Amino acid sequence: MKIAWHGHACFEVQGNEGTVLIDPHDGKSLGLRPPTCRPDLVLISHDHFDHNCVRVLKGQFTTVKEPGIREVKGIKIKGIEAEHDDVGGAKRGRVMMFRLELGGVSFLHCGDLGQALTPEQLRSIGKVDILFVPVGGVFTLDGRQAREAVADISPKVAVPMHYRYGGLSLSIQPVDAFLEGLPERKVRRVGNSIDFMREELPQDSEFWVFSP
């Protein structure tokens, strides 16, 4: 299996069932390069410009934005509603967290999660192997709140996203606060992409930090 980061909250996940792209951006609006891949399935957590730019993608693909359980091309998907802020969505509305399964590995992409997860949401999420969680604050959870979400979900791997780096034009926080205090042996800097096998995933939570 393979995970590649296309910047911001945009991740590409490849398995035997196909290729999933989550939250594509156009690149230019953020000071980044646009995603370059030909997905079979595109998941959109919410319709903000930095998460919903399907027009930059090539090929034939299915797009999913809605809550609920479905299977697309052998890929199991569950959309779980959440708030984009900590006031019930009054400021920024709602987002979709997507749980998906490829190659026997369960993933959760939290989108622009801005609230503490409720017991009901945690029950709906269930077991997660690899978690993509926003950490940059301002529009989403900040580093401390994201660490709490990781503790609540207890994945094998936590991947920070939606933080300030390089030429990103959004005024959000860098990843540092999220990583502060973590044992060095728990933090794995994986570059732009990583190939892995399900059997190789750690038993205790590890933190994979991607770079452009």
Image (spheres, rainbow, N blue to C red):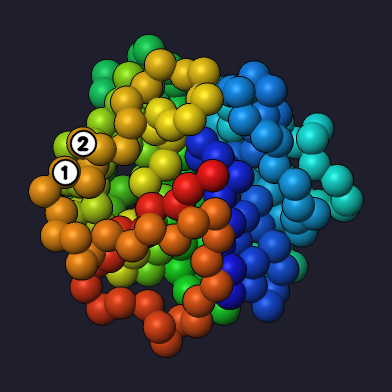
Residue 172 visible to the viewer = yes
Circle 1: element type: loop
Three-letter amino acid code at disc 2?
A: Ala
Residue at image point 22% right, 64% down = 186
Q: Position of residue 120 (x, y in %)?
A: 27, 49
Residue at image point 69% right, 48% down = 42
Quarter of the C terminus within the rendering = top right
Q: Point out which mark residue 88 bears.
A: none
Three-letter amino acid code at disc 1?
A: Glu
Q: Position of residue 121 (x, y in %)?
A: 31, 48
Quarter of the N terminus within the rendering = bottom right
Quarter of the rendering containing residue 103? bottom right
Circle 2: element type: helix
Residue at image point 27% right, 65% down = 206
Circle 2 is placed at which residue position? 177
Q: Position of residue 183 (x, y in %)?
A: 14, 60
Q: Is residue 21 left or right of residue 122?
A: right
Q: Is residue 115 left or right of residue 108?
A: left
Circle 1 is placed at which residue position? 180
Residue, far bottom:
199
Residue at image point 49% right, 56% down = 191
